[in-house]
Amino acid sequence: MTDERPKATSTIQVDNDRLRVAEWRFAPGAETGWHRHEYDYAVVPMTTGKLLLEEPDGERIAELTAGVSYARAEGVEHNVINANDYEFVFVEVEIK
């Protein structure tokens, strides 16, 4: 038997022919579930804290700082988990 994590929630703020912008909210321990990005994207953390990233090659902790963005290329497969005991929020901007 596996433990079921709560699911992170996303709210689409912009979705047009060039961009998709979503706000992601993670309760403590919540996850996105495994997914693969079809577009290049940037993440803008709104919270400072740690996210556990499950990737095909293993797990790692990403320490993020509110307002300090990062970008990744399309095709990234992973699961993102809030490793904090408080809500974590980021905005994801996908470039179509």
Image (cartoon, grey):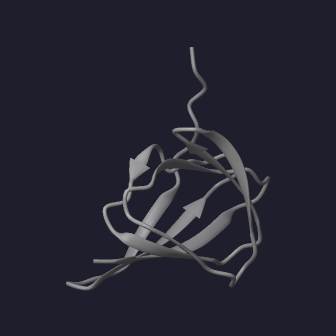
Image quarter (top left, top right, bottom left or bottom right) of the C terminus:
bottom left
Of all residues, the one furthest to the left in this rendering is 17
Q: Position of residue 51 (x, y in %)?
A: 69, 56
Left or right, 60 with respect to 76, comes to right
Q: Position of residue 77 (x, y in %)?
A: 44, 49
Image quarter (top left, top right, bottom left or bottom right) of the N terminus:
top right
Of all residues, the one furthest to the top in this rendering is 1
Left or right, 44 with respect to 40, comes to right
Q: Quick one: 14 or 40, which is closer to the camera?
A: 40
Q: Position of residue 47 (x, y in %)?
A: 71, 73
Q: Quick one: 96 or 11, which is closer to the camera?
A: 96
Q: Tell me if residue 88 comes above or below residue 82 in the rendering.
A: below
Q: Residue at x 77, y 54 (%)?
A: 84
Q: Residue at x 43, y 67 (%)?
A: 73
How many marks overall? 0
Q: Residue at x 59, y 43 (%)?
A: 54
Q: Position of residue 94 (x, y in %)?
A: 38, 75
Q: Hey, which quadrant is residue 25 in on the image? A: bottom right
Left or right, 45 with respect to 19, comes to right
Q: Residue at x 64, y 55 (%)?
A: 27
Q: Tell me if residue 75 comes above or below residue 13 in the rendering.
A: above
Q: Quick one: 44 or 86, which is closer to the camera?
A: 44
Q: Hey, which quadrant is residue 75 in on the image? A: bottom left
